[in-house]
Image (tube, rainbow, N blue to C red):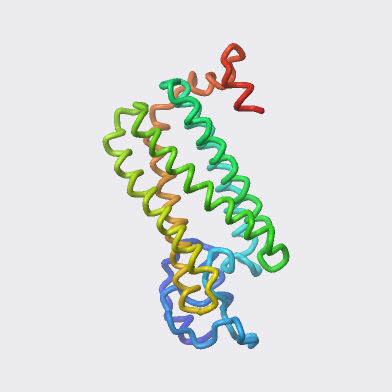
Amino acid sequence: MTERTRSHPTLHCEMWYGLAYSNDHVCSLIDWAPGSPCGNNTSTACCNVPTISSSGTNSPESSLFTATINAGSFLFLVFCIFHHAHILDRNRVQSMLSRIALVFGGVAAVGAFVAGNCNPTALTIGHYLGAAVSFLCICFYSLLLTVLTGKCVLTHMEWVLYPARIVSTGIQIVVTVCYTILFVQEDYMYKHIAALFEWIMSVNLELFELSFAVEFWFFSSSTLSTLMRKKEEEKPILLS
């Protein structure tokens, strides 16, 4: 292990990045002039651009990467369903907009699941297609959920949630666009910046999801029952 590796701080955004870096599988996020980035360099000592994908490509971090993405995708889908149920229970006027948001959230979860289970080196097309669909749908979902936060009174804490989600959604959309533009560039510097944007997207999304905790505090057993009422039209549409 090189001296550069030993001196690197251990505070990482995700555990699998820490594993990947400690095993010299990716370059450092804070080192903008690595000695041997992979690309045209075929040396076994080279390191990959520290994107989320490359940080979960090799063993042993690949197992943690897949498990984390799978768990995150499932929880995100559950959050989307619960939030939709909350709106149906408290403000049915916005049920159509909430249903559209639920579709985007569900597709984003499926895309993330596909990306997490398709290794970038073995199933490259599947991985990047799933990631692209997930990133795009997350932008639409966060935008629609922010609009719903401004229209629906679910917790009486919307005066805090609404501006916070506006900022978070703006960051998510801008960073996603920048990441998309930079990721396709060939120069290492651009790809390194794209990697930073990708980690920012991940952290920002986690903070956005954390805001759900405020609404779930006001969740009740009767909320989920709104999805199970056969006499309401929402059930066949939701489950179709």
Above or below: residue 179 compared with residue 154: below
Above or below: residue 74 compared with residue 9: above
Residue shown at the point (40%, 38%) measured from the top left: 213
List x then y, in percent, for residue 129.
64, 56
List x then y, in percent, for residue 220.
45, 23
Residue 131 visible to the viewer = yes
Residue shown at the point (61%, 49%) measured from the top left: 111
Q: Quadrant of the C terminus?
A: top right
Front residue (pair 127, 2): 127
Q: Quadrant of residue 11?
A: bottom left
List x then y, in percent, for residue 134.
56, 50
Front residue (pair 167, 22): 167
List x then y, in percent, for residue 218.
39, 27
Front residue (pair 70, 128): 128
Residue shown at the point (47%, 68%) measured from the top left: 194
Above or below: residue 51 compared with residue 93: below
Report the residue that reaches farthest toward the right.
Answer: 122
Give the tally of numbered discs. 0
Above or below: residue 202 compared with residue 223: below
Q: Quadrant of the N terminus?
A: bottom right
Q: Quadrant of residue 67?
A: bottom right
State left or right for residue 176 relative to residue 133. left
Report the residue that reaches farthest toward the top.
Answer: 231
Residue 23 visible to the viewer = no
Residue shown at the point (64%, 85%) measured from the top left: 44
State left or right for residue 104 relative to residue 113. left
Report the residue that reaches farthest toward the left.
Answer: 159
